[in-house]
Image: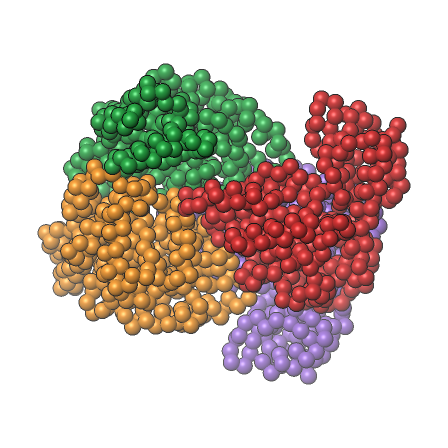
Chain colours: A orange, B green, C purple, D red
């Protein structure tokens, strides 16, 4: 039974485990002051091409979102998210727990556009409603779609001219950056946002996300927030070692690229067999529409989530590939689909 | 340069890394629903001798404290801690961030006694002050001292009869349980408290603490709180695998025992050389009082924290041993001290 | 220039001011322990016909909502509101500040029905999303509509069978209870909800709302929450005196009835002159649709809020009457409209 | 039975009630946008001699403290208070509920000095502990003592040079300003602090405190915080009218002066009869030490709080005078004491 449920079903890429082993018995400072964390941060800064940014390594995505947004906003400020945004639907009110409302705007493809933000601004103009202050996007989105360079630029300019913070959730960022036609680089992510994070957990690490803060106003005292929310690991080294390895010899992008290729292969195979899709996704999450009977059959050999009812006979399912997905599993799925 | 700064300077015990490697490519469910986590929980329940408890694996100690206390208390309720308690002095107001005051009581040895709690209850008797509801203890304490079985029993009875929750921070619990004269077992910890946690990070794991909830009223919906505070790791397996290994063949206690033995050896060696101590600690943190000049000398070969000024010429330092401390480093330190 | 902007443009009904004067120099206990507060609470209990309820007098509506909801919910629980609900749109994220998400459901008339709640429950079934726990309704709604006895009963039964708290915002409750065809009494409000409040500020008092808690589980320690959120007035007597007077000789309902009558008169007058309405409201807020040009003209003599754009030439406005609205102002408005 | 329990036992000064009556039927804007609030604010600005300050009228002291401190601090920042401070002991954890710790420093007289603040700064120097950011003082203190101009200046300079916000709770500010030897004016309060409030509730108003914000960085968006915490009264006029009257013809200071004079008269009378005091208070709260038997006797004719046990036979009591205290009650108390 092969699982396409998500991209965190396996442990870590072997090179990462190896790095943990090799460094294991060296004594290091705690709480992220170790040499590996410093080295990882240095590598990422160089890759981004900006030494004037702050980078913090954090255990997981929800934790990164809640700490960043909680630190960036004052009590009366709110964030804006697509109605499909992870913070809006899948984090058990983590943002609200920090005291901030997530104002959602409708989106068909998981993306958010300036016009929708403007509507929120128009209806939030005095002290009887919250002050929208941060725009949350995810790239790729929760539907596998991605922002083009142009779209990011537009969002960035809109946010700047409206004094809004632009924050990007990059849980699967590698996957977005490896889509060539989008033409978005790590440097672009940094240039166009005030802060964003580079996901590790879903890209071959055991755990870990790298939060990048560019906006000078958002940097101050950030480690206090990490500690206060329980995110400053005593053995911070385990995050450092992993990101050090991920950004050595391009490993991070190789893994993301593999995940994309497997998803593309699966998409093509299903398309050839006349399968329709809920949405066009160039990344490692795809959403084919299957007959319910077919789903039942496929579930005998594969596990995956049914995403959305289309009509009485059909549903969209979500298939997720990863750095660890073997080509054979893709081909088997296509074969099984064709039957 | 050998570091006695803390018990989280190295990575993980080799058996733990090995377990991570062996399980690495098997696909598992996410968010703590994997087979390893289930197995680890089952082992701990058996060891405690109580199947009717809930166990949750969490990344770190501050995170465990803030989630547990935040979940257990209603908004108008407060916790009581020794003035040396970790939640009172070293967690950047994590508990206050959840909205709850930490009321401190004076303590010379890091422990808290019913009389001190009673004083707090006496001065908190109406709605103009908070309602004390939870007593926080750490075992061992932040000063390395431990509670005897009798002391835990007294605290437990006092709390029960005053409708107070007794919660124990066990960041270094193994070390306390391995002190024979205290005569406290994992079962006792469970019997005498409403909830407590078994520390992994400082006992040979890469990261991870096992929160045990016995009180029926505190169990409900706990996974919601984990998710909301960003503590439900996508690859929860990495916590499960580590605790599975720690509680196989007594590894957890072997490691704690080693740490204690190294600390005891160090204590004896220093005592023989007429060294005085700030406090008597039978666990893996000891607090010798050294001449400032001596400290300067020792710092050339060892790193450690100066804890407290005693007078103009003397200070107490903190020396921490761990599962990884080699006997030679102990002997070297003693030698160097004698010079 | 007469204002139909709201029902809190004037001070208090003269009888209330008189009561303040008469009681002024008597020394009373502070913080709601005065004889007037006790007397007011006793009167309301008798009127409701239930001695086994708790009543707390609080300064304003937003404050009442945030304290009640903040006290009733645990951190991982959320409330459900119509998308027009005051807590969802007009309280500057007060509920989110207490850490709780307001999940909104679409509503055309400001009311919420069991089917919509069921949809929320269906999509909130595990720990990755919040646990819906409280249903917030307002009666009358923010659109002036009201719940019938049957509708309240249905909601009540649905909530009970789904372990949901039903909470009613009664900022203008008098106005709802005075609509005869709805056939809802103060006792019904108490029977069908777990808690609700009786608005004073918009019904002739200087300030003050009376929160009624029937559900036994929600009563405990409530005064702690009042104090913690700054709602326990030192001179609590000023709330007690006002509610004492409002519930003497039926004054509360007389005032609400007057407000309704004035609104009905206005509605009839405008209808006769062929005016259409955004919604049918039997209470003291009405929403006629006017030509923009007409609005401009009317604004020379009256002040009121433009509520919603209908099309390029027409907008709905909101006209609010109160205990203080003179019949002449109504007639003048109709006259002016007819011109 | 005359009560010396507090200075909020009666209603309001008759001139205030009169002002409410006279303005009652005029329609005004809601939420503090009325003419009276604007006029009151203008009067206070003139009195302070600074037009470049923001003033907000709020219902009560705890509410003012929690909104101001909650708005001024970021999540990882803490406040420092004397251990006798109202926010530390008598507000049911209102500040902690906003997420901020109140770090207390020992004080015998209710006052706080730079040396004590420096000690806190010394022990709070990294991200494992909170960042102290605001110093809370009360003037007069909870023990009736006051700060001299020199002491305020010292505190002010210390705070400025350490980047700390100085905030003063002026629940009984009038009483402090009327002590001639202290030589502190309303302008001084403004000059030496970043923000402070002028208490109305304990100085003859039904309710109301005027928060003055001088520090430019603390002013922005403050009304959002008021609304979010439920403090923006629909009929904000009732606060405006009262402060308008209090600052007409020096009424505020006349009332405070009367309270002080009555307290001084009582102090002198008791001193002449050889009574000792817990502390020297020049304001309207005094703390004579009485024999327990004497207390019992006096309680037959007067009500007051026993403050603190001195020894087995003696206790300090708290006697509070106010704008409403008649001279005869003072003389009666002295007579009764002498018996």
Q: Position of residue A331 (x, y in %)?
A: 11, 54
The answer, for residue A160, to whether it is visible in the render is yes
Query: Front-most of D199 and B99?
Result: D199
Determine whether, in the image, residue A33 is placed left or right of residue B138.
left
Is residue B274 left or right of C86 when viewed as pictured?
left
Viewer-proximal residue, D77 or C158?
Answer: D77
Could you tell me which residue is drawn at 38 percent across and 18 percent down?
B182
Q: Is residue A208 left or right of residue A119?
A: left
Image height of B272 relative to D185, above or below: above
Q: Residue at x 67, y 73 (%)?
A: C303
Image quadrant where one finds the C terminus of chain D: top right
User: Picture coordinates of residue B181 (x, y %)?
Assistant: 37, 16
Instruction: Please say if A120 is above or below A39.
Output: below
Q: Position of residue D334 (x, y in %)?
A: 86, 35
Q: Position of residue B198 (x, y in %)?
A: 34, 30
Residue in view at x 79 percent, y 46 percent: D260
Figure label count: 0
Q: Quadrant of the N terminus of chain D?
A: top right
């Amino acid at each position: 039974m092969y699982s396409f449920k998500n991209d965190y079903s396996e442990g870590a890429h072997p090179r990462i485990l190896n790095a943990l082993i090799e460094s294991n018995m060296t004594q290091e400072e705690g709480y992220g002051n170790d040499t590996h964390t410093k080295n990882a941060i240095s590598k990422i800064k160089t890759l981004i091409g900006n030494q004037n940014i702050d980078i913090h390594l954090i255990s997981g995505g929800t934790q990164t979102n809640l700490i960043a947004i909680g630190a960036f906003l004052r009590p009366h400020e709110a964030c804006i998210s697509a109605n499909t945004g992870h913070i809006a639907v899948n984090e058990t009110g983590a943002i609200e727990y920090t005291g901030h409302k997530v104002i959602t705007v409708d989106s068909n493809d998981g993306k958010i556009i300036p016009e929708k933000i403007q509507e929120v601004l128009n209806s939030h103009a005095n002290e009887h409603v919250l002050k929208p202050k941060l725009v949350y996007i995810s790239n790729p989105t929760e539907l596998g779609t991605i922002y083009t360079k142009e779209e990011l630029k537009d969002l960035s300019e809109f946010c700047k001219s409206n004094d809004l913070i632009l924050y990007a959730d990059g849980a699967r960022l590698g996957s977005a950056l490896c889509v060539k036609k989008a033409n978005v680089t790590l440097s672009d992510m940094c240039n166009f946002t005030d802060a964003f994070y580079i996901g590790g957990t879903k890209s071959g690490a055991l755990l870990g996300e790298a939060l990048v803060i560019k906006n000078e106003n958002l940097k101050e005292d950030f480690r206090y927030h990490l500690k206060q929310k329980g995110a400053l690991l005593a053995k911070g080294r385990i995050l450092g070692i992993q990101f050090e390895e991920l950004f050595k010899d391009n490993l991070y992008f190789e893994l993301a690229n593999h995940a994309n290729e497997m998803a593309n292969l699966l998409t093509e195979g299903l398309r050839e067999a006349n399968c329709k899709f809920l949405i066009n996704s160039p990344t490692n999450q795809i959403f084919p529409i299957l007959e319910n009977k077919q789903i039942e059959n496929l579930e005998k050999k594969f596990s995956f989530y049914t995403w959305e009812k289309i009509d009485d006979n059909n549903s969209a399912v979500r298939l997720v590939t990863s750095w660890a997905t073997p080509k054979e599993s893709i081909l088997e799925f296509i074969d099984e689909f064709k039957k």
